[in-house]
Amino acid sequence: MPNATPANRSIDQWFSTAAFSIPQPFTSGTSARNALFGPGLFSWDAGIVKAIPTTERIRTTFRAELFNATNHTSLGLPATNLSVPATVGRITGTSAGARTVQFGMRVDF
């Protein structure tokens, strides 16, 4: 059985498709469980909170939250359906969204 990891990984060939084949009908394949791993996930979230005492009885809280603050692209999982040879082994999406910033304000009285 050929090695499933190609020499130069890319989004067009994350694993070698020659290492796998469709098993005969009504039989199980011989591939090990969890034989393939996708790319890792990197998403750094951050938040800033500032409490502002407005009066003796009223307090205002301001929040700023950043999701995927570094805006790092995290690739999705490769396609693994051997029945569709045009896409098998290719990564066509991402697993984390782009940077998102949200603000919030709360007044306690």
Image (cartoon, rainbow, N blue to C red):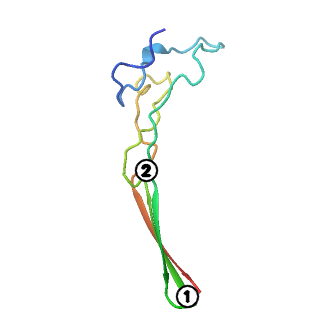
Asked if 75 appears above or below 9 in the picture, the reply is below
The three-letter amino acid code for the residue at tag 1 is Ile
Residue at image point 44% right, 48% down: 43
Residue 3 picture location, percent across and down: 44, 14
Residue 31 picture location, percent across and down: 57, 16
Alpha carbon of mark 2 to alpha carbon of mark 1: how far?
A: 37 Å
- The residue beneath circle 1 is 58
Pick whichever, 51 or 95, lies toward us: 51
Per the image, label 2 sits on a secondary structure element best described as loop
The image quarter containing residue 29 is top right
Q: In which quarter of the image is the C terminus?
A: bottom right
Outermost residue on the right side: it is 26
Asked if 9 appears above or below 107 in the picture, the reply is above
Per the image, label 1 sits on a secondary structure element best described as loop
Pick whichever, 40 or 57, lies toward us: 57
Outermost residue on the bottom side: it is 56
Residue 104 picture location, percent across and down: 48, 72
- The residue beneath circle 2 is 97
Label 2 Cα crowd, 10 Å radius (few <14 / some 14-19 / many 20+)? few
The three-letter amino acid code for the residue at tag 2 is Gly
Asked if 71 appears above or below 106 in the picture, the reply is above
Q: Is residue 47 left or right of residue 72?
A: right
- N-terminal of the pair, mark 2 or mark 1, is 1
Q: Marks 1 and 2: in contact by CB < 8 Å?
A: no
Residue at image point 46% right, 43% down: 95
Residue at image point 66% right, 14% down: 26
